[in-house]
Amino acid sequence: MDTKIGAVDACNPASNDVGGPPIGAVCTIQSSSVPSIAFSSSEATLGRHLARRLVQVGVTDVFTVPGDFNLTLLDHLIAEPGLNNVGCCNELNAGYAADGYARARGVGACVVTFTVGGLSVLNAIAGAYSENLPLICVVGGPNSNDYGTNRVLHHTIGVPDFSQELRCFQTVTCYQAVVNNLEDAHEQIDTAISTALKESKPVYISISCNLPGIPHPTFSREPVPFSLSPRLSNQLGLEAAVEATAEFLNKAVKPVLVGGPKLRVAHASDAFVELADACGYALAVMPSAKGLVPEHHPHFIGTYWGAVSTAFCAEIVESADAYLFAGPIFNDYSSVGYSLLLKKEKAIILQPDRVTIANGPAFGCILMKDFLRALAKRLKRNTTAYENYHRIFVPEGHPLKSEPKEPLRVNIMFQHIQKLLSSETAVIAETGDSWFNCQKLKLPRGCGYEFQMQYGSIGWSVGATLGYAQAVPEKRVIACIGDGSFQVTAQDVSTMLRNGQRTIIFLLNNGGYTIEVEIHDGPYNVIKNWNYTALVDAFHNGEGKCWTAKVQYEDELIEAIETATGAKKDSLCFIEVIVHKDDTSKELLEWGSRVSAANSRPPNPQ
């Protein structure tokens, strides 16, 4: 890959899809006479160059856990005026926070120490890889003089081979840079960052602990801004794909559109909506694409999730004679244990750079957003599927009204959470029953929504909430977290407080891992109950703004929400909601039984 950086006057970003720059190759030098700022020797260091590059691509907060191999690097990162250090309680949460930050900003970054920190953050990096998020993981590495020697270092497994961490990261990052000399440090760092942006995947950068503070001529001037020129579709292939797709869909009687999670990495959400506007088809989303398509669209019919779809959505999608899926991921969870009633011969599958038409041709080197915009001009308007939906649709009923002092039910709780949502809020849904309850929330225009469906790591939401809230402080984040997940990563609520965040956390206390109970129950799914509000009060410890409440009845929940949105609107609000251990959504019951059946299939005959 070409890693030269273009001239300032020729490299103004063309879009802000990913942290500012668009996706594509790095442009080449246009002029040698571009004025640039010269730095003093204290600023002309590797550490300051990395800091400037992070700020340049849109990272203004970096999530860190200090360790002896990264301390000098951290000195130089925090010296950069545009970069804020967010110290986390552990590396896993630092990685989750960078994940949440990347979802809101388009790119995130974390800094940890060698091996003990790197292997701790690895799970979060794997999750970001699965979700196609550009994340820059920086590790403070061994002294450059120790490479190639027979020395055994601390923070290793006791052998004189420093590559264990690198080998682990090779499977969950799209590029790895080991910076142990200054001569090519500039090129390695720039290549890593540009690759993260182009591939929309995490990258790994290891920097020897003795290098960040050393001045070097390659860092003596303001780095020329990144400008990643857009990728281009194969024009002939694009035209052929559009023609074949238009012919396929225009023959259909009741076609539908379904948005998938890869709309994000393809930067194609707007183009997808333009297509929906033009063709009039019924419009649905897969569960992991919730938030990527506006739910106020006039032809929106809900979430397509097989047997646990929103009401009347699956009937319309699965009875269609043609469906276009834009950026889908069909795994065992999204397919409800491989039980979707879809037929390949009816499907057009769009991936970020590929189009497959039913059992027929496939076209490569075609960008999804180019394809969608071109297709919008060729489709005949057909509103049949939406009209069918409109005819059979029956509005949702309301949960039974609670009696005074009746234990609070989950469906009542989410009825009140629905009223909280606006363009100034964002929802973070933890792995578990919150997946299903939050999926039923109707998102108003501009309301953010995130969850981690592909990787499904419990505890993700605490760090992700920290990162998301740090990235968009103008939004109030509403996090729905189960007690089992919270116990995995609870510590970094203290980091939210330290950074003045005003998130509302609803902690569902039902005494265990409910999602796992519905897949396969056992005594291991019961957890030790904590005094969660007291724990958060202990994190608070009189520093920052924090308010906690424990609720068991609807009137207590109403009062708590009024306080959180009124007198305590500028505080982090933690509301522990006590619910029955068997109070789950009907969708989880159905989904759990189907996933259980898929997991328990007997071995094929040998």
Image (cartoon, helix red, strand yellow):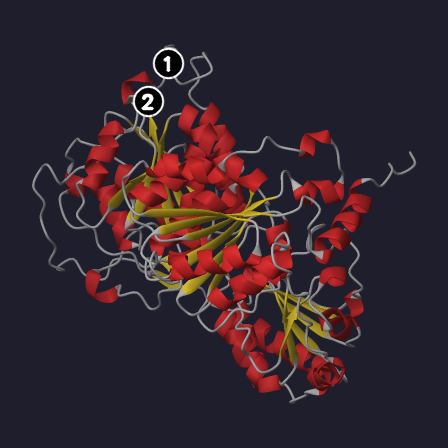
Residue under the point 36% across and 62% down: 566
Up the image or down, 391 lies above or below 323; here it is: below
Up the image or down, 287 lies above or below 324; here it is: above
- Residue that label 1 marks: 153
Q: Residues within 10 Å of mark 1 (few under 14, many from 20)?
A: some
Of 400 and 372, which appears nearest the observer?
A: 400
- Residue that label 2 marks: 142
Describe residue 473's horizontal placement relative to residue 131 as left or right: left
Up the image or down, 89 lies above or below 210; here it is: below
Numbered marks: total: 2
Q: Amino acid at mark 1?
A: Leu
Contact check, label 1 and label 2, Cβ < 8 Å: yes
Of 436 and 235, which appears nearest the observer?
A: 436
Up the image or down, 310 lies above or below 225; here it is: below
Of 406 and 140, which appears nearest the observer?
A: 406
Describe residue 293's horizontal placement relative to residue 139 as left or right: right
Mark 2 element type? loop
Q: x, y (%) of residue 440?
A: 62, 64
Describe residue 453's horizontal placement relative to residue 95 as left or right: right
| Image mark for residue 356 | none
| Quadrant occupied by the C terminus | top right
Q: Residues within 10 Å of mark 2 (few under 14, many from 20)?
A: many
Residue under the point 37% across and 50% down: 572
